[in-house]
Amino acid sequence: MKKQKKIKSPIDEMIIDLILEHYNIQSLTGQAESLTGDEFMELVEIAELQYYAKTIIETEVGLA
C-alpha cells in the first residue's frame, strides 16, 4: 500500500488555528463554544490578510 502525499494549504492551517483560538477564548471565558457563519467568514478574512502579509514579508524580490 502506497502512502499518498498530503497537500497542505497554509491558509487552511491559519483558518484552523483561528477557529481553535476562537473556541479556546470562549471556553476560558465561560461561554458556550459556538461559531456562527458570520464569525467563520470573519476568521477566513483575517486568515487571508495574515497569509498575504506573511507572503509579502517572506518573498524575496527578484532582480532582472
Image (spheres, helix red, strand yellow):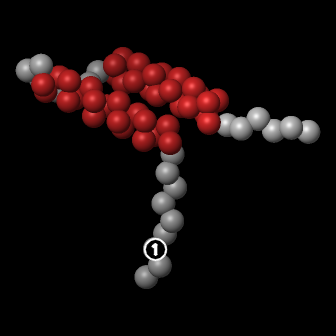
Q: Position of residue 37 (x, y in %)?
A: 34, 22
User: Label 1 sits on what residue type?
Assistant: Lys
Q: Position of residue 23 (x, y in %)?
A: 22, 29
- Secondary structure of the residue carrying tag 1 is loop
Q: Is 5 above or below relative to 34?
A: below
* Residue in the foreground of this view, choosing between 63 and 39: 63
* Residue in the foreground of this view, choosing between 61 and 11: 61
Q: Which residue is drawn at 46% across and 74% down?
A: 3
Q: In this view, does 23 lie to the left or right of 12?
A: left
Location of residue 12 (image quadrant): top left
Q: Where is residue 29 in the image (x, y as percent from the top left)?
A: 12, 19
Q: Where is residue 5 in the image (x, y as percent from the top left)?
A: 51, 65
Q: Which residue is drawn at 20% across and 24% down?
A: 25
* Residue in the foreground of this view, choosing between 41 and 12: 12
Q: Quadrant of the N terminus?
A: bottom left
Q: In which quarter of the image is the C terminus?
A: top right
Residue 6 in view of the camera: yes
Q: Which residue is drawn at 76% across and 35% down?
A: 61
Location of residue 43 (image quadrant): top left
